[in-house]
Image (cartoon, coloured by chain):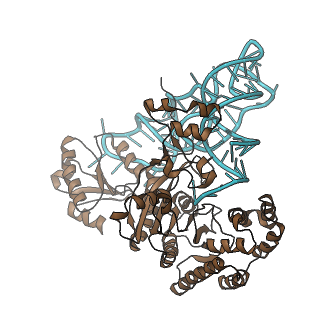
Chain colours: A brown, B cyan
RNA sequence: GUGGUUGUAGCUCAGUUGGUUAGAGCGCCUGAUUGUGGUUCAGGAGGUCGUCGGUUCGAGACCGAUCUUCCACCCCA
């Protein structure tokens, strides 16, 4: 009884050429992370439900993949809860584990558990898949990779600066030319709420104004009304929609606007520091833009918030990040401010693909293939293959003395650069015949000369 | 989670108001070519028409459910 195989919704296989391109992205990111002193860690795909639930807001909880208890444990199912339609309680009775939703919360758990083994400020990076029970769309999957770098144990703005530099360095290295790092500060958003007299509605306000780009001013106003913000407050917020000019000009306006809010001014001050420092240091290709309407959904951010968008392709944000002052306190460790960023590798992949920015060399396979003419020739080729590999040349020996046509086709399909033809004649004369698969040229030489040719 | 959309050969897609044996291009295999791929020519294999059920004398086509794809919301990388 065989049935057609299929993948779970929103998941993908990665073919060799895709993998090569993905690794190119990961390696570029890793190299830069290393340059800034971040060390790699990994955490399990699954966490206890209690570690994840409640950390991403109500919406987030809904998108967490639950793992069903195994075997007899399902008998613990709380059927009363099911009858009462208390689905949350029922779920908890049959599931105690869940797939991680992002890398930041598991990292906070990790820091708390290993605090005695870590040196603070602790700089770590992590490249692993995360899972979300979202409805898939283009550039949006149920399993995707995040490439995070975080620092915990310091509230120094040095790290905000470093993280901006990392965004710039990685994306520039990947060949992107026109992208913007958008930056804002949650303290400014708190200040705005304060100035409007709606401190307790800060989440509602930020969620609404975050959409300015998408739904325009009228849309935001409508959303604010729907979310129960007073008309007075909306009038107060109004000037922010048209905030324009350079970063310096925007900051100046905001300073006046937030004059009565201590926290707001603190945010402005922090932002100003980061912008000034980056101004001095310079960036390769990125533009750093202060955007007061940038809010980001995750509600654990407390200071700087980042988002990176490319102007070359129509696509949502490709990176995000921000500062969180209190994430580890959820697990009992206070006073551990952290700041981190995340590259959305899958979206970056799509961008590079669309802009044709992957270097050709990325997908190259073995450089050399030996044609197989028979058992004794094969033995000879295996020796030469060992020598090639020892000198750092990737190669393979065709596994059987199949028809030449078949062997050549295989080499062609795999993008092999050189095919070596070594039959009885070549062995007798102590030479190799080699064919350049790009030009089609073929010649004979000693093995040493051939080695020099391809290494040169 | 809400509304819509898609599914036919390995891939990209045709397939008339429901009517014999479901097609094309590309790819794949074999041969022309027993030591030559990428070009050419000849031949060949490959389909439970996403799945299950229904309507009908008859369903790839119509209806329902379900899965999947993509899109707009929600939210987000």
Q: Nearer the viewer, residue A264 or A340?
A: A264
Is B70 rendered above or below residue B9?
below
Q: Nearer the viewer, residue B48 or A336?
A: A336
Q: Quadrant of residue A303?
A: bottom right
Q: Quadrant of residue B65?
A: top right
| Residue A438 visible | no
Q: Return the x and y of residue A159 as percentages of the image width and height.
A: 48, 75
Is A99 rendered above or below residue B57?
below
Q: Return the x and y of residue A90 as percentages of the image width and height.
A: 57, 36
Q: Residue at x 33, y 44 (%)?
A: A404
Is A415 rendered above or below residue A224?
above
| Residue A76 visible | yes
Q: Nearer the viewer, residue A402 or A349?
A: A349
Give the total number of marks visible in the rendering: 0
Is A236 on the left or on the right of A168, as rendered? right
Q: Quadrant of the C terminus of chain A?
A: bottom left
Q: Return the x and y of residue A215 as percentages of the image width and height.
A: 76, 62
Q: Return the x and y of residue A251 as percentages of the image width and height.
A: 67, 82
Q: Quadrant of residue A42?
A: bottom left
Is A373 on the left or on the right of A324, as rendered? left
Q: Nearer the viewer, residue A323 or A233?
A: A233
């Amino acid at each position: 009884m065989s049935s057609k195989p299929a993948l779970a919704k929103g998941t993908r296989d990665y073919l060799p050429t895709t993998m090569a391109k993905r690794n190119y992205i990961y390696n570029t990111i890793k190299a830069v992370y290393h340059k800034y002193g971040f060390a790699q860690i990994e955490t399990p795909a699954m966490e206890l439900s209690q570690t994840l639930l409640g950390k991403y807001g109500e919406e987030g909880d809904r998108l967490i993949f639950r793992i069903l208890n195994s075997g007899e444990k399902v008998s613990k199912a709380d059927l009363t809860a099911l009858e009462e339609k208390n689905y949350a309680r029922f779920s908890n009775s049959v599931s105690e584990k869940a797939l991680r939703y992002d890398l930041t919360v598991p990292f906070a758990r990790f820091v708390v558990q290993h605090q005695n083994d870590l040196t603070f400020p602790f700089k770590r990076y992590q490249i692993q898949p995360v899972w979300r029970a979202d409805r898939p769309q283009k550039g949006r999957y149920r399993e995707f990779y995040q490439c995070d770098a975080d620092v915990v144990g310091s509230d120094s703005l040095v790290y905000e600066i470093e993280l901006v530099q990392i965004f710039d360095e990685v994306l520039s290295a990947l060949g992107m030319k026109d992208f913007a790092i958008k930056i804002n500060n949650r303290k400014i958003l708190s200040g705005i709420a304060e100035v409007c007299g709606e401190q307790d509605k800060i989440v509602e306000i930020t969620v609404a104004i975050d959409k300015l780009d998408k739904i325009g001013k009228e849309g935001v106003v409508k959303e604010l009304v729907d979310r129960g913000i007073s008309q007075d407050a909306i009038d107060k917020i109004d000037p922010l929609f048209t905030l324009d000019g350079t970063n310096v000009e925007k900051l100046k306006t905001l300073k006046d606007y937030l004059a009565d809010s201590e926290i707001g001014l603190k945010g402005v001050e922090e932002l100003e520091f980061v912008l000034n420092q980056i101004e001095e240091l310079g960036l390769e290709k990125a533009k750093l833009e202060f955007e007061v309407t940038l809010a980001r959904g995750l509600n654990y951010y407390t200071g700087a918030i980042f988002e990176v968008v490319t102007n070359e392709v129509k696509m949502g944000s490709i990176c995000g990040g921000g500062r969180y002052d209190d994430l580890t306190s959820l697990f009992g460790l206070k006073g551990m401010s952290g700041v981190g960023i995340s590259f959305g590798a899958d979206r970056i992949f799509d961008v590079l693909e669309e802009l044709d920015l992957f270097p050709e060399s990325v997908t190259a396979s073995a450089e050399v293939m030996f044609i197989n003419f028979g058992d004794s020739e094969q033995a000879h080729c295996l020796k030469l293959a060992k020598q090639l590999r020892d000198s750092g040349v990737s190669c393979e020996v065709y596994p059987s003395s199949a028809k030449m046509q078949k062997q050549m086709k295989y080499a062609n399909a795999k993008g092999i650069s050189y095919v070596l033809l070594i039959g009885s004649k070549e062995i007798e004369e102590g030479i190799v015949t080699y064919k350049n698969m790009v030009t089609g040229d073929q010649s004979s030489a000693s093995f040493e000369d051939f080695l020099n040719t391809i290494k040169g």
